[in-house]
Image (spheres, coloured by chain):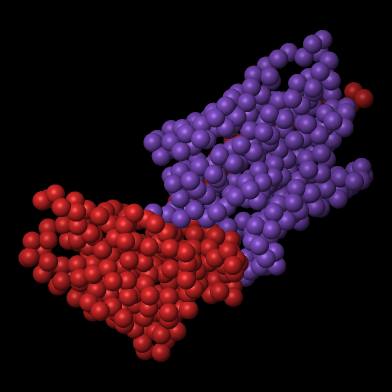
Chain colours: A purple, B red
Amino acid sequence: MVRAPEWEMYIVWYFFLGGIAGGAYFAAAIADNFGGRRDREIAKVGYFIAFPLTLICGALLTLDLGTPSRFLNMLKLFNFWNPMSIGSWGIGAFGVFSFICAFLSLSDSEGLLTLRRNIAKVGSWFGFFLAAYTGVLLSNTAQPIWRDARLMGALFLASGASTGLASIAMISYFRSANLGESWSKLKKADSFAIVVELVLLLGLVLMLGPAADPLTKGRFALPFWGGLVALGLVVPLGLSFLKPGDGRERTAGGTLAIASVLVLIGGFLLRYVVLMAGQL
Amino acid sequence: MAKTLAMFTDTSVCTGCRACQVACKQWNQLSMEKPEWTGTYQNHEHFTEKTWRLVRFKEKRADDGRLKFLMMSDVCKHCAQAGCLEACPTGAIYRTQFGTVNVNQDVCNGCRNCVSACPFGVVAFNHETGRVNKCTFCNDRIHNDMPTACAKTCPTQSIQFGEREDLVARAKRRLAELKAQGEKEANLYGVDEKGPLGGLNAFFLLLDKPSNYGLPEDPKLPQRNVKTDSAFSIGSALLLGAGLVVAFRERGGNGSSGEEE
């Protein structure tokens, strides 16, 4: 008989926003380093999303402790194989990288651009880490569902990628950015992340077998199948196959923005159902 | 290093008097809690931040059809491979020179990672202090050559305190005795240092299967999969990274789309 750690809404929001921050950052770093001139706009949006979200993540984590100053106790120790310990250091390091890249994005100077790109090459690994480690943290507890979910870290990383890209697309749309063919690149990237996420989610459920029941049956069946799988993954993936009318990029952006909102809802529901169903 | 201390709880002589539960509360100054109706004499349902010794009353129907109690005074197992200790990100949970596992209240920051990691549901979050509590193995007493309060008070010697080696030998003798008397299901839980969790420093002689006492049959260290799970995550990162590189890469090699403004 195990005891639930009472990780509730602060942690759900932290897992969700931390995934977006990490995903938006590594997507930005890749767009910055491998994309063209227009993709730099995507990169900037990604950095501008990652940094403030990291601050919010820090706030959520300290609030969850009840006495915020006790967060410093996490830094008394560096234990490489302890996800929470290395995570506390990792989120700090990620905060530094995301701050520098967001700060450098304020300028259009070519010299700073090169610097930003190089810093992002290193920082992107911390972005991957931030998106994934929360899953590994859950899968190394004694709680039902979590303890048998070998793919949880991989799945959270894919969700971080899809929600990170979705948040970039959504914000780009609302600030009416002139992204040109970058829209189709964003769409392609997000579709790929969604497919990977769907495959990992399926794999995770199959590997759990009957242990997945609290997640896939009962009170969480609707948010899991209806919310996460259908609305959050399958529908946005279907939307990505719609052909933009007359090749108008703005319309394509609009469809992508709608798909993005759904992906974000799905990403939130993933963290919510996983955390709650593991602590029934 | 001092010799490893242990508690051996022989459930075959437990009478369910709960003196251990009371002694624990008194010595450790744990305040009272509202009683719970659990359907049996057991109270509480489970360990709490203020109940570190708990006598379990499990009802079992005997072969002749009559109900009998399986009674067991449960406690933190002070595992040799302790999930809570591995989980603690602050170093608040530590192993003492006697091999017991303890929470340093000044360092604990209330993250609850240990709560999620204990295979026995022992560690409990205290909402008043915002930190976690569990059995300390009477840390103050054992450092002053005194036995734990529960063992000292147990009127039937169901709870025995001493050096682990001695108690293991005693437990094995007692098991052989009971087997000879026809207790076919009797077994030792947590004695084997090569067994689950590297052996428990609070181990038990049970008269029935562990699961009938609410104990996991084969408890495992929760953190045993960190490397596997990390490897899957790294694979996922490489796959997604490669996919995103392909999606964002400029085709034609001369950045044509970037020049069309």
> Foreground: B117 or A133?
B117
Relative to A220, is B121 on the left or the right? left
Residue at 49%, 59% (x, y): give it: B115
Q: Residue furthest top?
A: A246
Residue plotted at (64% across, 22% down): A235
Counting from the top left corner in percent of width and height, residue B2 is at: 37, 84
A67 w.r.t. B158: above or below: above
Residue B90 showing in the rendered view: no
Task: State the image coordinates of residue B235 (x, y, percent, origin top left).
Answer: 55, 41
Query: Which residue corresponds to the image point at 74% horizontal and 25% vertical from the top-left?
Result: A258
For residue B213, what is the image quadrant?
Answer: bottom left
- The residue lying toward the viewer, choosing from B71 and A212, is B71
Residue A191 image-quadrant placement: top right
Position of residue B61 measured from the top left corner of the image (x, y, whole percent): 19, 51
Count of all numbered marks drawn on residues in the image: 0
Q: Look at the picture and state if B187 lies above or below B254.
A: below
Residue A118 percent coordinates (x, y): 77, 48
Point out the residue furthest to the bottom here: B144
**Quarter occupied by the N terminus of chain A:** bottom left
Q: Is residue B135 above or below residue A19?
A: below
Residue A95 lies left or right of residue A195; in this view the side is right
- At horizontal 41% and vertical 89% (from top left) the residue drawn is B144
Foreground residue among B7 and A247: B7
